[in-house]
């Protein structure tokens, strides 16, 4: 209301988008199938350990993978500071989902971030804008949104609505310090 110092400036479209995002977060969507993922994680770990300069997943990374791969929810989140192993988790996540014939796609706000996501995780990635403009959208897939906090409300609402319409799961990835 004009003259009220507590009034905030926004447009109705943003308010509507934010309400839709909040409602989606409350709903969580239908439960997805929960395939047996432990064997895929063990195989990924063995493969990584055997590679030149190999490494093993930490206990925390294995725990996070088990949670993400078995949650069954339409929306999940992976939050961690820089250097805590989010990319390694995403590489193992993709490996396990590939073994279950579940397609994984990556999105990021910026082209450089999409390129980095694809190069480091192996997840086919593109920008959010490119994805939203494309007439073809994946179905029954997992969409990884890197640096999710950088996506504006209107585009986030579009991504969520698209996930609902195409029976896709979304994994929001971010770093609270960025």
Image (tube, rainbow, N blue to C red):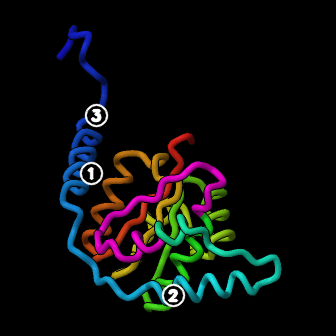
| Residue plotted at (39% across, 79% down) | 141
User: Quick check: is 44 in the magenta stretch?
Assistant: no
Split into 4 quadrants, where in the image is the C terminus?
top right
The answer to whether 96 appears left or right of 18 in the picture is right
Please tell me the numbered disc located at residue 11.
3
Crowd tier of the residue under label 1, counting other residues whose Cα lies within 10 Å: few below 14, some 14–19, many 20 or above: many
The answer to which of marks 3 and 2 sits earlier in the sequence is: 3
Q: Foreground residue, 68 or 19?
A: 68
The stretch in magenta equals 65-86
Residue 3 screen position, x and y as percent:
22, 8
Q: Do the residues bearing badges 2 and 1 touch, measured as CB atoms within 8 Å?
A: no
The residue mark sitting in front, 2 or 1, is 2
Q: Secondary structure at mark 3?
A: loop
Residue behind mark 2: 40
The answer to whether 140 appears left or right of 83 in the picture is left
Q: Is residue 42 above or below residue 172?
A: below
| Residue plotted at (43% across, 91% down) | 100
Residue behind mark 1: 21
Q: Foreground residue, 20 or 76?
A: 76
Q: Do the residues bearing badges 3 and 2 touch, measured as CB atoms within 8 Å?
A: no
Q: CA distance from mark 3 to mark 1?
A: 16 Å
Outermost residue toward the right in this view: 52
**Residue 48 occupies quadrant:** bottom right
| Residue plotted at (19% across, 52% down) | 23
Split into 4 quadrants, where in the image is the N terminus?
top left
Q: CA distance from mark 3 to mark 2?
A: 46 Å
């Amino acid at each position: 209301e004009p003259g009220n110092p507590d009034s905030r400036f926004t447009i109705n479209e943003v308010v509507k988008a934010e309400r839709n995002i909040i409602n989606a977060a409350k709903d969580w969507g239908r439960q997805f199938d929960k395939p047996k993922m432990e064997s895929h994680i063990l195989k990924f770990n063995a493969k990584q350990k055997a590679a030149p300069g190999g490494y093993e997943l930490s206990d925390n990374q294995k725990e996070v993978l088990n949670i993400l791969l078995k949650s069954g929810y339409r929306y999940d989140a992976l939050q961690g500071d820089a250097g805590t192993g989010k990319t390694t988790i995403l590489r193992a996540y993709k490996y396990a989902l590939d073994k279950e014939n579940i397609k994984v796609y990556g999105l990021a706000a910026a082209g450089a971030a999409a390129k980095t996501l694809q190069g480091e995780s192996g997840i086919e990635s593109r920008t959010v804008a490119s994805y939203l403009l494309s007439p073809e959208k994946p179905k029954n897939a997992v969409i990884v949104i890197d640096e999710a906090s950088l996506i504006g409300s209107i585009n986030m609402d579009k991504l969520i609505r698209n996930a609902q319409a195409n029976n896709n799961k979304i994994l929001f990835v971010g770093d609270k310090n960025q």
